[in-house]
Every structure is written in C-alpha cells, then in structure tokens.
Amino acid sequence: MQLTSEGSEHDELDFEFLGNREGKPYTLQTNVYANGKGDREQRLHLWFDPTANFHDYKFFGTNIRLWVYKNKSNIGAGYPRKGMQIEASLWNGESWATDGGQAKINWTYAPFKAGFQGFDVSGCQTQSSSNDQRCLNSDHKYWWNSQKFWQLDPTQQDNIKMCSKSISTMTIVKIGKVTTSHYCVFPKEESNDGSCSEATLALSLLLLLPILSSATGEEEFSEELLLKPLPDRKVLAHFHFQSEATISDDSFARHHHLFPKSISQLVKKYHIKEMELSFTQGRWNYERWGGFDPMSSRNAKPPGVELWAVFDVPLHQVDASWKNLTHSLSGLFCASINFLESSTSYFVPKWAFPPALDNLRYGTLPREAVCTENLTPWLKLLPCRDKAGLSTLMDRPSIYRSFYHSQRLHLTTSRAAADGLNSGVILEQTLTVVLQPNIQRAGINYLSETNLQPSWSLSSIFGRKINGRCVLAKSSNVYLQVESGLVAQLENLQKNTAVYAANDTDPEDFGGNLGFELSVTPYRVHREVGKSSSILYEYPIKEYKDTEQFDLGLTWKHPVVWSSPHAPLYASRFLMGSGNERGTIAISLKSTELTQGFFAISNLEERCKLQVNVLQIVPWYIKVYYHTLQLLVDERPQVITDFVERMHVSPSEDKVSPGVMELVLRFPCEIKSAVLNIEFDKGFLHIDEYPPDANQGFDIPSAIISFPDYHASLQFSDNSISKSPMLSKLQEKSPVLSYTEVLLVPLTTPDFSMPYNVITITCTVFALYFGSLLNVLRRRVAEEERLLKNKG
C-alpha cells in the first residue's frame, strides 16, 4: 500500500509487506520518495502473522518524535509536498525482497490475494498536485494543519535533543519493536510561489493488533522525589517511579514503549494479580523516624528480601506459580530469591498480613545481602534508567553508606473490561533512603550551634544535582515535606518572636523567615488538612530552567527539636535464655504518646480496646512450644484468653514447612506495656544443611505487628495533588504496621574440622605403612652390601 503522486518526479510514502521464509517472521518495509528519489527504506520484523487475520494499521501521531525531516527544497533537498492518492497492489519483488533475493516466489501457491476491510482515511481531498490552500487552512477540520503543528514546541525540541544525544538506543527500540512515527507538520510560512519554504515532517507508523490499537497512548511514566528532614539530624529521600500499561491476553510478545517488557511477561506467564518485592539494608528506626505515617507503613521493610504475591490461578496451581516466579525474579534481580521456592521458606498468611487471601504466598530471606547488583537491574526497568531524570541522583556510594535503604517493586493488575480481555498493569518502583548530610561537603560550620540541624542540599547528600527531567516522564516533581511535629514547633517559635508579630507572616511561609531557608523558591505550597498539619513544597522540574542544574537546599536558622508521629505501641523483639538447647522469644510492646492520648477516649467510652495483630514466623529447626505462650500486661502475668481474640498456629514440620503463629490481641487503651513470651528448642541439622558461615548463627525473620484500627495517610485539600501518583498513594489509607528486629539464633554446630583431621591422620598412617612396605620390597640387600665393601 502506498501514497503516491503522479509524474516522473513523484512523491511517495510506501508501506510494504515483504516475502518470508516459512517459519520466519514477516518483514514490514517503509520508504519515502521525494521528487522521484527514495533510498529511505526502514525495515522491522513483525511479532505476529499478518496473513492469519485482519489487523489495524494506522498512521498515528505520538508525543515523542525521533527524527525531524525538514523541508529544505529551497536549497535542493527533496521533500514530499505533492498531492497523493492511495494505491494498493501485489507485485513481484523476488529479486530483492526476501533474504536479498535468495528466496524466490513459489508460484504453486498462485493466485495471490490481499484482503482489505474497514478502510478509513482522514485527509484533505484535492484535485491539484500542488499544495491546496484549503487544506492548509488552520480553521478547517484538518487539525494536524493547525498552527500549533507548524513547528516543534520546547518540550518536543528537548525530546529530539535527548534522543540524539544521550539515549540513541531508544531509537533502535522504537524502530525494532513497534513504532516508527510519521506525521506531517505543514509550513510555518510560504514562499511567493505557494511552495513550502520551511516545514517539519515527523513520521510515525504504529502497528498494533485490533485490540491493542489504542493501548500505546495508555502507557504512562512518572518520576517523583520526596525529601523530608528527620528529628535525629538525618534526611529522608523517597524516590517514586510509576509505569502504567495495558496488557492483552492474546498478545504475549507485546512490545511496550515505556513499560518494562520483562515485568509484563511475568504478569502474563504466572498470572500475577499483585506482587511486592523489596531489598532492604538496615532497619527502620520507628522511635526516631516515625511509625504512624504512610512512609513507615508502606515503605519501611524488614532487612533482607521480602516477597509476597497473589496469583490469579486455581489453588492447586499457586505453589507451582510461586516457585517459578521466585526463579524468574532471582535471575532478573541477580539475587538468591530462588531459595524461597522451598516450602520451608514461605507460607500462607490467614488474616494477620494484608491482603489475606488463599492465593497469597509470603516469604523472606533476612540474611540476603543487598548490593549494586540488585540496584542495577532495578534501574534498568526505568525508561531512562539512571541516565536522565531524578534517577541520576542515585549515587551508589551515597546510597550504600546510608543508615537505611530499601528498594521496592510493587505490581498491581486489574481487569478493565467485563469480558476480561484487557488488563491494566501498574508498576511502582520506590527507593527509600535515610542519609546523614555531609557537613563538609555542604560547607557549613556548626561549632557555635551544636544543637542546630545540619543544613543540606541535593548535592551535599547525593554528590549530584538534577540536570533535567526524563523526557519520557509525564510528570517529574520534587517535593519537600515538613511534617506536623516540625510545623508545630516552628509555629511556636514564630509566635514567641517579635518578628512574627511585626511581619504578620503567613503560616505557609514561616520556613523562609525564622525556621529555615530554601535555596529554590517552590512552585506551589500544599498544606495538609487539620491544625498543625504537615506542609508540602512542590518543585516541578519542567518549571525551572533547563540550563541550570536543580539543587534544592535547606539551611536551618535556629535549633529546633521535634518528634515524628509514632504508632500506638512501639514493638521490639529479643531472645532470652542461654545454651544451645533451648531459649525464649519475647515480643515487647510499649506505649507511645499516641497510646497515652487514649485516656481521654477511655473516659468517654466504657470499654476502649486497642487491637494488635501479631504475625510470627520461625524456621522449621526452631521447635516452638506454642502451649508455653505467656502474656504480661503492665508487668503482671495475665490469662491468655482474656486478651487473645483469635489465634492461628501452624506448627513447623521438619524440613517441610516453617512454624507460623498469628494472634489478634485486644488491650485496654490505657496499657503501658505488654510482653509475649514463647519457649522453643533448637533442632539439629544435617551436616549438608549448614551454610558456610554456620558459626555466625541462624536468622529468624522479623515479626509483623499491625494495628488494623488505625490507618496512616496524608490528606490535602488541593485537587492537583491527585495528579501525582506518589501523593495519591500517600493519601490512601494504609494500615499502621511495623517490623521487629531479625533475631540471630546460635544452633549446635558440629566440629567441621573433625573430618579433615580424620582424613589427615588416615593419610599419614597409609603413607607410613605403604612407604615402609615399598621400601622393604624394593631394597636390594646384596647389592647394597657390595657397594659398601667397594667404598671401604
């Protein structure tokens, strides 16, 4: 099929299906003729059989142009500018079309037929071979001829520069996997003879199956960064990347523009409904960094690897899907996730871990070491990787020197239609880092103000600045959050200062007057609903000059002490007992300022209760005696049944399954402390089951403590917040939960040196015996005596 003009020096746009060898993919070729000259062929291999059924082929415009083909006909360069007609034909191209002409046409299959249906064209009909002024009228229905398309806007120019300068591989991906875009931007101005003197032509051809014809426009990517000062002189940096796509059930080999193909294949192959994978180094400090906010509830993860997944398959296939998924993720992220395939490493939570479903599987590897080999494949899932946008801040030494860092991948699928043909997929990638500002790098001296919070900037904590946004991102924003406790302290500081009364400062601007100064003026300021609530400063990267590097900084003026909001109870866990035979696991719950505020509620209500869910997992070699469970409330022993509302216990089975205990506890609101004790015996392992560092000990995964009656969220009245994927997530109510410490249990370890000692002694005995025996057998006594006499 082609668009062609008449005459010897014709213009032509070709769209051709080339022949193929049996079993090989079909090849699509495009070409552009200008004034009778072509030689602009582009080819791509199709991922489907175009002869099997009717498919939709469209000339479709995209927001990202990869090439600019300018009209330079005034200096002799060819440019298609004549009126064209549509033609379709079959013709003999065996001399060149298939494998360079090596494969010839098999005429036994004649006659050859091509079928067309549902043909539609939106174009300007004209009888003239030259430019028709009626078609160039911007007021006409031909919207692509309007003035806005006469030249590239600054964003499109940035896209051109980005593609040509830093991500040339994107061009190959766009050509080789789905798209090569084409559409016409008519002249900005015309010469006297009515010809085009300056025009831009960007071509884009979108090939999709019928069900996917509109899916490309649905792919979106956004990048966001949230910064927050912490009370203990540290800074929280939370990166959030979100990719969205539509996946069709009948197209496994779907080629995506922005969404990572490897993830879409996992979704299709293993029928994943929801999945979360995290790699964490360090432990979230719930006492200092907070435990009653969306950041701690959603992004604070246990040390090592945590994986849970919900499968959309029959129950008898869930375990097989889980095992295959662990192997795929292990290879994808260069980690030991495949160890979770063993039934001793995963289990099925009943109701203590949301979402509690029969198709859910949960597993952890607390000893997994997190390094750059895990971060690099995680970054490769981003459209711009770490070459452009906010991800360029991810300096490896800065991240791995941090007090806490956790990279998380959350995948959610949803059915978009009643027939279930299309699935929407949302991939969230987050990196949460707690860093200590580099005072020397920031150039700040604190000898006079020892209590002053350290001032910081992006360049001082990451060693880098933001050079611009990722051009493929729909939104690229940086946020600075001032949490409610800090807001209250700074407001009190202003009220107690004469400057506050004199200036009559707006509460949202207090940071730039007394408490701290910002190096960059925020584009917008959001305040959370409520009194003494948090404040959010918004910085859209596109609103700042591309010629200058974005380096947000915060400079403190006065010492400020505040605390982050805590969960109703602070949870910790420890071991008791000594020796290599038995011990006790203790889970301690202590009241916080939130619990102390329950006294007012308990005075109004007759029986105020605080619900606490506990999920404890132990390896099979830790023999827990669940009947020894003891509960102490306010340091006094209590009857278990008075506080335990529900209890589910799954005893461990040797080398088959771990031990699981789920509890639903209800404490009085005025509780000050509670301790759960449970005894266990230490099992014996086979010598082959010990790891290389057996003397270090064995890890018991973190226990999960949740408070289902309490949900953490940020609530803003500004409707523009809903356009931000990260802030939309933070506004969703999430159950307050926390992870306890990982316990290190020493087990009875055999003397691994004994086998080597036995081997050494045995070899020595054999050497002495056989050496002496061979010496006796091989000695020639008579000859030795003759030699001795000769010497004498």
Image: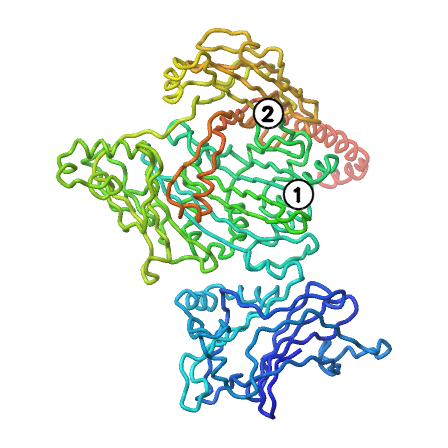
Q: Distance between the residues labelled 1 and 2?
A: 22 Å
Q: How crowded is mark 1: few (under 14 residues within 10 Å), some or many (20 or more)?
A: some
- Which quarter of the image is occupied by the C terminus? top right
Q: Which residue is drawn at 69% across and 31% down?
A: 343
- Left or right: where 479 falls relative to 382: left
Q: Where is residue 298 in the image (x, y as percent from the top left)?
A: 48, 36
Give the numbered dot on residue 14.
none
User: Residue at point 25% right, 46% down?
Assistant: 443
Q: Where, by quadrant of the figure, is residue 32 drawn?
A: bottom right
Find residue 766 and report its image quarter. top right
Q: Name the residue under label 1.
A: 327
Residue kind at label 2, given as amino acid type = Ile
On screen, 701 above or below 187? above
Q: How many neighbours does mark 2 have within 10 angstroms: few (below 14), some (14-19), or many (20 or more)?
A: many
Q: Which of 329 and 445 is in front in this view?
A: 329
Q: Mark 2 points at which residue?
A: 617
